[in-house]
Image (cartoon, rainbow, N blue to C red):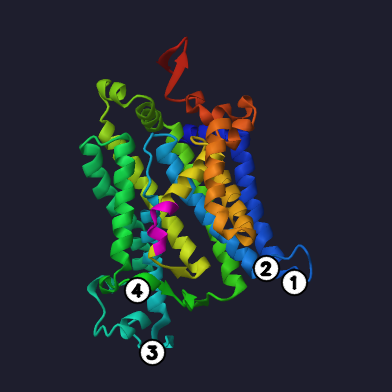
């Protein structure tokens, strides 16, 4: 990246109010939450409890997942109803490492086999568990597992030119098939109970608030970096191509672009982001099981993005925070009615706020985010025609 491009990206970010508010909010979370948890006494109304710490960490992971979905849906027009699968795969990769970290401290005291394998009379560790006692290997698998699945799926789907509702149905079928597979006890992933009872991560006690504070800070940093990378993508020349694919795939193909290649790489990148979100989610929540593959989870993510504002990046993050906070409040008083409320929210937003809550912000304040062509490089628009900037 040249100095001029770095400068252009920095100036563009500074001029965009949404980016400033978003990054400022992440900095506030990363600084204030640990202080309010560790330094403020529990008797104070400003104290962040262990439960509140877990909720904030969960919301940050969900926000990263929403960002991944918004990148492909809001900017490339790929409506995935199966991103929960990639989120869960990243979570399972982290869970396998955490289970190996337990060692002889498990219920059955086996230094090699996790408790569920001992209970099911497994005699030796399956081959696909090898290496997960090393954090570096586990970290690599957190990226490769969702990324390779996304690559294989996208290669066949996009090369076959499957689009629209058909692609959405196939992604939903994918996550449902994986959920059924992981529910089986003989697959070696804990069956319907999944993984839980984690002890530590990299030698640090997962039950301590200090470790959870660090995980919240890491989640905030990863979310901020991922946002800037996504923003760089959509503001680049390749980003303009994927937006052209969203608006008219056939016309973009006729112009000579390899549409399938552009869709494939942005889809794979999105699945990797989802996997990272799942990997950060597991140590903070303390459990991972096949219910994370549930198709309803993928549909909820789409609702978060729609509520926040599709095609805005920070709108997807805002939608993830708002909807999940509402879910936390609503399920406390009316747990059986939450999905009815969620469906009603989606219908109301679709009818009344087609651009989401970000659409309520005056258009001038979000112009540079919604229109990457305002960048000083690449292709611009003048007199209704695309022209290169000098």
Part of the protein shown in magenta: 291-297
Mark found first going from the N terminus, 3 or 2: 2
Residue count near mark 4 (Cα–Cα under 10 Å), binned few <14, some 14–19, many ≥20 = many
Q: Which residue is mark 2?
A: 49
Locate residue 162, reporting x and y percent: 25, 36
**Contact flag, marks 1 and 2 (Cβ < 8 Å):** yes
Residue count near mark 2 (Cα–Cα under 10 Å), binned few <14, some 14–19, many ≥20 = some
**Contact flag, marks 4 and 1 (Cβ < 8 Å):** no
Q: From what the image shows, is residue 301 above or below residue 366?
A: below
Locate residue 218, reporting x and y percent: 53, 60
Locate residue 89, reporting x and y percent: 36, 60
Q: Which residue is mark 1?
A: 42
Quadrant housing residue 233: top left
Mark found first going from the N terminus, 1 or 3: 1
Q: CA distance from mark 4 to mark 1?
A: 37 Å
Say which residue appears at 56% left-offset and 60% top-offset: 57
Say which residue appears at 42% left-offset and 88% top-offset: 107
Q: Which residue is mark 3?
A: 108
Q: Is residue 314 visible?
A: no
Say which residue appears at 47% left-offset and 24% top-offset: 373
Residue count near mark 3 (Cα–Cα under 10 Å), binned few <14, some 14–19, many ≥20 = some
Q: From what the image shows, is residue 235 above or below residue 121?
A: above
Q: Which residue is mark 4?
A: 190
């Amino acid at each position: 990246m040249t100095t001029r491009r770095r400068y252009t990206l920095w100036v563009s970010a500074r001029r965009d109010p949404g980016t400033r508010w978003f990054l400022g909010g992440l900095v506030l979370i990363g600084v204030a939450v640990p202080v309010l948890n560790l330094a403020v006494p529990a008797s104070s109304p400003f104290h962040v409890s262990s439960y509140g710490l877990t909720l904030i960490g969960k919301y940050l992971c969900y926000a990263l997942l929403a960002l991944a979905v918004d990148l492909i849906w809001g900017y490339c027009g790929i409506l995935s109803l199966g991103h929960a699968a990639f989120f869960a795969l990243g979570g399972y990769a982290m869970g396998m490492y955490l289970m190996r970290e337990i060692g002889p401290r498990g219920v059955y005291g086996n230094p090699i086999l996790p408790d569920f394998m001992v209970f099911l009379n497994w005699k030796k560790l399956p081959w696909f568990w090898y290496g997960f006692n090393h954090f570096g290997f586990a970290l690599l698998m957190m990226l490769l597992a969702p990324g390779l699945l996304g690559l294989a799926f996208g290669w066949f789907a996009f090369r076959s030119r499957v689009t629209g509702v058909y692609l959405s149905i196939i992604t939903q079928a994918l996550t449902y098939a994986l959920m059924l597979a992981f529910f089986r006890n003989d697959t070696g992933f804990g069956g319907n109970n999944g993984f839980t009872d984690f002890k530590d991560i990299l030698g640090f006690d997962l039950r301590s608030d200090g470790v959870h504070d660090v995980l919240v800070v890491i989640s905030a940093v990863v979310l901020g970096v991922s946002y800037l990378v996504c923003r760089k993508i959509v503001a680049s020349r390749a980003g303009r191509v994927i937006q052209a694919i969203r608006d008219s795939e056939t016309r973009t193909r006729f112009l000579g672009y390899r549409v399938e290649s552009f869709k494939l790489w942005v889809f794979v990148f999105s699945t990797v982001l989802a996997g990272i979100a799942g990997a950060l989610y597991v140590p903070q929540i303390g459990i991972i099981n096949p219910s994370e593959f549930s198709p309803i989870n993928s549909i909820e993510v789409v609702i978060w993005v729609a509520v926040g504002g599709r095609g805005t990046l920070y709108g997807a993050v805002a939608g993830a925070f708002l909807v999940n906070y509402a879910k936390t409040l609503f399920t406390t008083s009316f747990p059986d009615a939450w999905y009815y409320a969620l469906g009603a929210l989606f219908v109301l937003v679709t009818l009344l706020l087609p651009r989401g809550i970000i659409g309520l912000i005056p258009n001038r304040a979000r112009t540079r985010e919604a229109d990457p062509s305002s960048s000083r490089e690449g292709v611009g628009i003048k007199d209704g025609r695309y022209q290169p900037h000098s």
